[in-house]
Image (cartoon, rainbow, N blue to C red):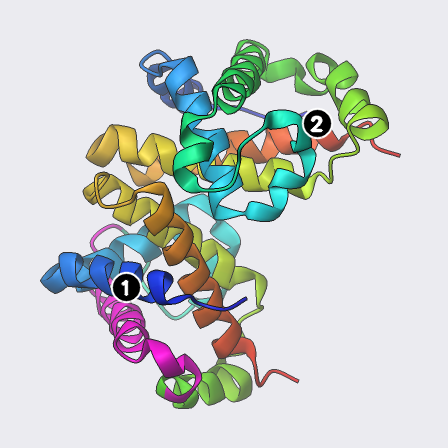
Amino acid sequence: MVLSAADKTNVKGVFAKIGGHAEDYGAETLERMFAAYPQTKTYFPHFDLGKGSAQVKGHGKKVAAALVEAANHIDDIAGALSKLSDLHAQKLRVDPVNFKLLGQCFLVVVACHNPALLTPEVHASLDKFLCAVGNVLTAKYR
Amino acid sequence: MVHWSAEEKQLISSVWGKVNVEECGAEALARLLIVYPWTQRFFDNFGNLSSPTAIIGNPKVRAHGKKVLTSFGEAIKNLDNLKATYSKLSELHCDKLHVDPENFRLLGDILVIVLAAHFGKDFTPSCQATWQKLVGVVAHALAHKYH
């Protein structure tokens, strides 16, 4: 799976439009993921996962920042997320299936807040981008 | 058998009540074919699927999308009896259509995104959770008769 020039333009466009809301989107993505896929909570036994949790907000901010970083270095996502990839492989070891779940929830958040932005073409590009990010983060697992 | 709380049933029917089945079905199927182009493999006889514009405007895609979502409506009327409701459809998808059940999961996820775009903030996390459960259960019921 390769990101075309059009995909890259579409993804950069999404993040430009989201702008300063990225952090909130990150938090909402996690909130939705924990609600829709309760098994994902098993990675956060040390977190307060209640509504409005400061820890979830803080973590959502980190997740969003990583996505923004990947979008800003879309020609070399593996390079941009190399340290994060090491972290996931060595320490976090989140099962690969969960990145798809996070991706689904991020798409839902974008759809909820910016329906006009998520045209079918942009939807396709963003889905590919999120897959690419997931692949990078699990690339060093074995 | 899947258990549905009163709240879940409410979230399902209140959303479904506001859905335009024809529009929503057409959009969901079009997006499936655009976002996951390999799903086009089942629709060789649909004519022009060469671009997102072609797919969105394709009358066969619209018609089939409506058919699929209308069937989904049947599921919603029979939440407590899904496997039986979809028994024949499941056999059809296995024996005649030869559709990998993974495709049901893909379409389900796309449907959730279409609903999110349509309902915006009203599509709350609980609402999404209920609908992710519903599409998962429908996909499971459709796969149940596979052999």
Q: Is residue A135 above or below residue B95?
A: below
Q: List the residue tagged with mark 1.
A: A9
Q: Tags 2 and 1 in contact by the CB under 8 Å rule?
A: no
Q: List the residue tagged with mark 2.
A: B142
Span colored in magenta = A51-79
Q: Amino acid at mark 2?
A: Leu
Q: Is residue B12 above or below residue B28?
A: above
x, y percentage for residue B31? 45, 38
Give the CA separation, mark 2 to mark 1: 38 Å
Residue A53 in sight = no
Does residue A70 appear to the left or right of A102 in the view shown? left
Q: Amino acid at mark 1?
A: Thr
x, y percentage for residue B112? 42, 35
Which chain hosts label 2?
A: B
x, y percentage for residue B132? 48, 37
Residue in the foreground of this view, choosing between B44 and A101: B44
Question: Residue at point 36% right, 47% down?
Answer: A121
Q: Residue furthest left?
A: A20
Q: Which mark is residue B63?
A: none
x, y percentage for residue B2? 62, 27
Question: How busy is the neighbourhood of tag 1: few (under 14 within 10 Å), some, or many (20 plus)?
Answer: some
